[in-house]
Structure formats: C-alpha cells, structure tokens
Image: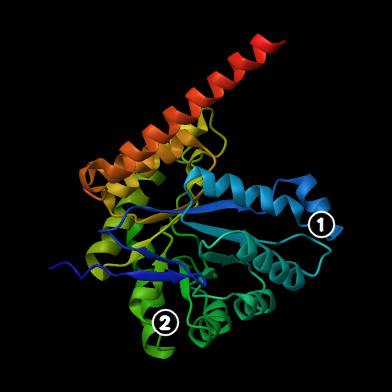
Amino acid sequence: MSAPLRRTVLRSASKEVVIAADQPFCVIGERINPTGRPVFQEALREGDLSIIEKDVAAQVAGGANVLDINMGVPLTDEADLLVRAIQLVQQVTDLPICIDSSVVEALEAGLVAYQGRALVNSVTAEDERLEAILPLVKKYDAAIVALPNDEHEIPMEHQRRLELTEKIVRVATQEYGIAIDDIVIDPLAMPIGADPTVGRETLLTIRGIVEQWGLNTTCGASNVSFGMPGRHAINGAWLSLAMSAGMTSAIMDARTPHVVDAVRASDLLLGNDEWGSAWITTHRARQAAEAAAAEAAAAATASA
C-alpha cells in the first residue's frame, strides 16, 4: 500500500505555494546564483546587488513559482550578502524563497531575515550536517531539501538512495520533530553523459520515495544534461519523465521557454492543469506579445 501524498507549504509575506502531487509542478528559479557567473561574482564582491533585480524579473516572467537564492562567493561575507539578497528579492516580488547555502551561519542569518516560510537547500544524510541544519529548520519553521548521500558515498543504486532517505526521514521526524510534509528529497539527478544508467536509477528512486513515504521531490534539473549538446531538449525530456515518476518540483532555469513549456505541457497531460486553462492562457499571452512586437517593429520600419 502506497504512503499518503504529502503537501509542502511555502510562503512569502503575502503568497503561498504548495508543492504536492495534485498541484502544478513547482518551478524553483535557479538564476540568483553566482556559480559560473564571473561578472555577477565581481559585482557581489563590490557590494552591488543590482543584477539580482534583473534575474528576479526574468524568472518571474518565465513562470517561476519560487526563487532559489545562493550567495556563495569566495572572499565575501556570505551571511551578509544572503541577508541583503533576501531583503532585496522580498522588495521586488512576492514569490516564496528557497535559501541555498552550505554555510550554517549564512542559513540562519537568511532564515532570520526572511519574512515567510522558506525552503532550505539543503542537507545530506551525513550525521554532522543533520545535526547542524535540522535544528535551524525546526526553529524557524522551514521546509528542507535533503539529498540521500552521506560521508561515505554518493550512491549510484536506487536501493541505497532509498536507505539513506529512510535515515533522513527517521532522524528529521523522530529526533527533531520536523513534519514529514516538510521534507523534500533530491533523488540525485546525475549527468547522463558520465553514466548511461543514472537517469533510470533516479527515476526508480523517485518512484520509491513516493511509494514508501509520499514525499515531494526536487532536483537540479540541468545536472542531467551537463557536458552534453542540446541541453535544453534533454532537460525538458528529463523533467517530463521525472514528473511522470512523481517528481513535484525542480530547481531550474525559469528563463528557458523550451524547458518550462515541457513542464507545463506535462502538467496538462498529468491532469494538474484543469481544462488546460494555464496552458491556453500562457499560449494566448505569448501570441499577444509576439503580435505587439511585430507591430512595433513594423511601425519602427515605417517611420525610418
């Protein structure tokens, strides 16, 4: 008998987002992250956060439901940057926030600054990390992304990932009193170019997590295509497969229409977009924007 499906509730000061199997897929925008962005890194070192406003606008326009914020820049005060970034994002959007840091002090500073109910990204099954992060999750009434790897391995077989998921659930719920609905598992989406079995193993992990605990799941959607050409096509196909296996959210590039369209089409086909209303509304809005752009271009040409 399958476990009951869970509902993970996130909030900003004025907006609530529910991650659940009977809800539209939760797109967690990944863009507010300096990794691989040298210009952004340099701006942050100089205390300039203005790029964040552009990132927020682009992701909101692309259809993000939650925004991930990571301020991990070497040679900076990450806690201070994270607080400032969270405060800025809260000023320009009402989307809930996923606070993304491996630094415990930065996580707590971010949780103190955030006005709402955050998602914390992330914790592993390592004893030391569980002991450091789960008390903060409980103290600040947050939800948590957890990865089923520990100090010994990043397991490749889905059976081992499920064993470590069991540990995370047991420790979080029994030792720290965290509600099972507030545990979101990252099933470890790995680069398909490095091992052709990783996609299948991750899908088996997702199905096992849903069947045994009913938990919500997420992943870094672009991980699967790393090192491969045509990454957007791979990412879109991956998310559709993962959604059919039970995945309910992903940390992904909300600015990429091809990938977001694959997610929203999957919502439609899986019955989470009643009568296709969201799909039709988005399509009509896109047609109107294209028509307006064409009209503006024609007017500019006529007046030249």
Quadrant where the N terminus is found in the figure = bottom left
Query: Could you say where residue 61 lies in the image, as x and y percent from the top left?
Result: 53, 44
Left/right of residue 215 with respect to residue 112 in the rendered view: left
Left/right of residue 20 with respect to residue 230 in the rendered view: left
The correct choice, above or below, for 13 with respect to 38 in the image is below
Compare residues 69 and 206 and report the one nearer the observer. Answer: 69
Q: Is residue 34 visible?
A: no
- On the image, numbered disc 1 is attached to which residue? 48
Query: Could you say where residue 217 lies in the image, as x and y percent from the top left?
Result: 38, 60
Q: Which tag, 2 or 1, sits closer to the chain's start? A: 1
User: What residue appears at the point 55 percent right and 39 percent down from the top-left corner?
Assistant: 226
Left/right of residue 201 with respect to residue 155 in the rendered view: left
Query: Could you say where residue 203 lies in the image, as x and y percent from the top left?
Result: 32, 50
Query: Could you say where residue 58 lies in the image, as x and y percent from the top left?
Result: 59, 44
Which residue is farthest front? 303
Q: Write down the quadrant of residue 209 in the picture.
A: bottom left
Give the spatial CA distance, label 2 vs label 1.
Answer: 37 Å
Q: For mark 2, give the secondary structure.
A: helix
Please tell me the numbered disc located at residue 304: none
For disc 1, the neighbor class at 10 Å (few under 14, some 14 to 19, many from 20) is few
- On the image, numbered disc 2 is attached to which residue? 172
Look at the image and name its color scheme.
rainbow
Compare residues 78 and 206 and report the one nearer the observer. Answer: 78
For disc 2, the neighbor class at 10 Å (few under 14, some 14 to 19, many from 20) is many
The correct choice, above or below, for 49 with respect to 226 in the image is below
Q: For mark 1, give the secondary structure.
A: loop
User: Amino acid type of disc 1?
Assistant: Asp
Left/right of residue 98 with respect to residue 87 in the rendered view: left
User: What residue appears at the point 20 percent right and 70 percent down from the top-left corner?
Assistant: 3
Q: Write down the quadrant of residue 199 in the picture.
A: top left
